[in-house]
Amino acid sequence: MLYAVIKSGGKQYRVEKDDQITIEKIAGKTGKKVKINNVILLNNNGKIIIEPDKLKKARVEASIMDLVKDDKVIVFKHKPRKNYQRKRGHRQQHTLLKIEEIILEKKKLLDEEVKKEKTKIKTKKKPAAKRIKAKKPTKSKEEVKKKRIEKKKETVKKATKDEEKKSAVSSVTKKKKPAAEKQKSKEETVKKKTVKKKAEDKKKSMKAESKEKKDTKKKEAKKKESSKKKK
C-alpha cells in the first residue's frame, strides 16, 4: 500500500491514488494537472520514509476537478450602547483535486534522468582523432659531439670575420688628416697652453701678495711690542 502525506495551504493531507480531496484555492483551471512537491511522509508497503534528503525528488501528481466554494460564514459585530453593528458574509474558495499518481525517487524520476542523459549523449560531438607524431630517429653520442664541435668552429669563424671588419674600418679612419685640420688642432693646443700659463701666473702672484701681507703684519706687530717695552 502506497500513500503520502502532503502539505498545502498550511494543512496536511493523507493521500492515496484515485483519492479526491478539497484543499485551499490553487491557481489553475479545471482539467489542469498539478504537481505537489511538498511531501512530508511516504509509506511504501510498510516502509516509512521521513528523511528530507530522500523526499526531495518525491512528488504527487493530481488534476483539478472543480473550483468550489465553502458554506457561507456570517460575521456579525455589535457594540452595546454605541449604535454599532456590522454584518458580513464569507465563503472560502477551495479546489477539488483527484490524485492520479504518487511518484517515488526510484521509479519514474530515475527513468526521466536516464532519458535526459541519452539525449545529451546523442547531441555531443565525437572528439577529433588525435594525431600521432612520428618519432624522430635517435642519434648516437658521437654524432652529437661532432655537431657541437662544428657549431663552435662556426662561431669562432664568425667572430674572427667581425674583428677583421672592425680593424679595416678603424684603419680607414686613422688616415692622415688634411693640412687645414692640422693647423686648427695646433691652434687649439696653443690656446689651451696659454690659458694654463695665465692661470698658473695668477696663482703665483696671489701667493706672493699673501706672503707680503703676512710679513708686513708681523713687522708691525714687532714694532708695537718694542715701543711698549721702551715705555
Image: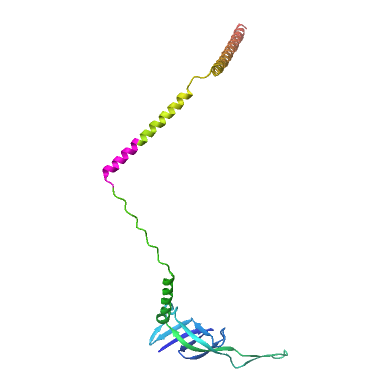
Q: Position of residue 46 (x, y in %)?
A: 38, 87
Residue at coordinates 59% horizontally, 7% vertically from top-left? Answer: 226
Quadrant the N terminus occupies: bottom left
Residue 45 horizontal side relative to residue 100, left or right: left
Q: Quadrant of residue 143?
A: top left
Residue 157 horizontal side relative to residue 70, left or right: left
Quadrant the C terminus occupies: top right
State the residue in front, 164 or 214.
164
Q: Quadrant of residue 192?
A: top right
Does the magenta segment cover residue 146? yes
Q: Position of residue 103 (x, y in %)?
A: 44, 83
Image: 198 above or below 19:
above
Image: 176 above or below 70:
above
Residue at coordinates 42% horizontally, 77% vertically from top-left? Answer: 115
**Residue with the most extreme bottom position:** 71
Image: 118 above or below 199:
below
Chain part drawn in magenta: 139-153
Q: Main secondary structure of the magenta part?
A: helix
Does the magenta segment cover residue 40? no
Residue 161 horizontal side relative to residue 206, left or right: left
Q: Quadrant of residue 187?
A: top right
State the residue in front, 10 or 17.
17
Q: Position of residue 136 (x, y in %)?
A: 31, 51
State the residue in front, 25 or 65.
65
